[in-house]
Amino acid sequence: MRPYRDPLVLGPLFRDETAATAAEAPTRTAGGSGTPGGPRVPGAQASRGGGPSPAAAAGTPESDTLRQPAVRGSIPRPASPVAPTPSPPTPSPRTLPAVLDPELTERPARACSGWWALAVAVLATGGGAALARYEELRPSTSPAEAWPLALFAGCALLTLAALAGLRRGRTGHAWSLTLFGRYRGTIRRTGLVWSSPLPRHARVDVRLRHWRSEPLCVVDAEGTALRSVVLVVWRVRDTARALLAVDDHTSYLRGQVESAVARVLSRMPADSFGPAPAEPETLRDTEAVGDELTRMLAAECKAVGIEVFSARPLNVEYAPEVAAAMQRRRIASIDARHRDSVLTSVLDAVDDTVHRMSDRGLVGLDDYERKALVKDLTVAFYTARGPAVDAH
């Protein structure tokens, strides 16, 4: 059985040997073996008598086969690629789905103009009055004598149904209809409207509304207690979800505002007391905080039919118990920044003055005199600029 031979592994080992054989090919002759002009077998080994081995003389690959185990043992096989272990997916924050119940979606209810119902009520009332005046209304077993009473009862029921189904549709309001606990539709028409008097009618305010929250107790990213007031602009977009998907949609909105404010304001510090960064990320950036609040509230309130247009913090201040300490810290930070800016400007002015005097040859100073001049100029410039900047 022929041993396994991997050409990909052994090929590079005999590249030089093959090149040498190709270079000696022109000097070979057609006959003879073992002579300078005879054919030479690559990789042939000399026997003990000085001649080539039978395998080399025959030109077989046995010589390569014999030394293959040693070569394969000395060269490590390439390691098989290991598939990278997939990192666990980052869990996304859980939010309410956009639709809690696909069947619970606002749809128009059956309704018509109330003027038609009013006309029918007037006609039915007039017919009943005519029957009462010109016909004798009394119960009887004979159909010929009982029809006036039956017609009068029909006119009365028709009048009652026409008047009981009349509704006044106001601009910015809608009527939500439910019958035996099942949603039957929503009426958004304005003016005099008639609908079936059997369902239960609930009025819903669909106008654009704003709500100003009470001071909410939250903490920032550093754990400092804060008080925040938020203004939310919203409206009811889906009356079916607002009335039936939640117990009270206004209370739900208040709870979501408190939750969103606590989550958003805890991501950043209220103030930055260190060196002024290029782009400070603090709660003083009300535009960024408001955009994040609006996005979060809109996602949480969409499931209950509430559309949030904007949520902006009106006021973010420290809690009374830490307000005095944080005010002192802020004043100290502002003073440190002020002194640093003044000192930087003074040092720049001193350096520029000394270089100008030296370049123009006004003074010739050694190291000791230069240090003294720098000291005097620094004191003079700082004394002149410090009070002026403080007063400004």
Image (spheres, rainbow, N blue to C red):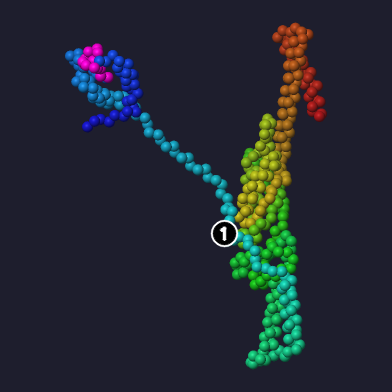
Residue 14 is inside the magenta segment: no
Can the viewer see residue 225 in this picture? Answer: no
- In terms of image quadrants, where is residue 366? top right
The magenta-colored residue range is 30-42
Residue 82: x and y in percent read: 40, 35
Q: Position of residue 106 (x, y in %)?
A: 63, 61
- Residue 32 or residue 14, whichever sits in front: 32
Confirm whether residue 170 shows in the render. yes
Left/right placement of residue 272 relative to residue 363 reads left
Q: Is residue 250 above or below residue 357?
A: below
Task: Reply yes or no: does residue 38 show up in magenta.
Answer: yes
**In-front residue for pair 64/172:** 64
Identified at 69% across, 76% down, the residue is 161
Judge whether 294 appears above or below 357 on screen. below
Which residue sits furthest left? 49
Name the side, left or right, on which 317 lies relative to 266: right
Q: Residue at x 58, y 50 (%)?
A: 95
The quarter of the displayed image where residue 103 is located: bottom right
* Along the viewing direction, whichever of 328 and 290 lies nearer the viewer: 290
Where residue 213 appears, as percent x and y from the top left, is 70, 51
Residue under circle 1? 102
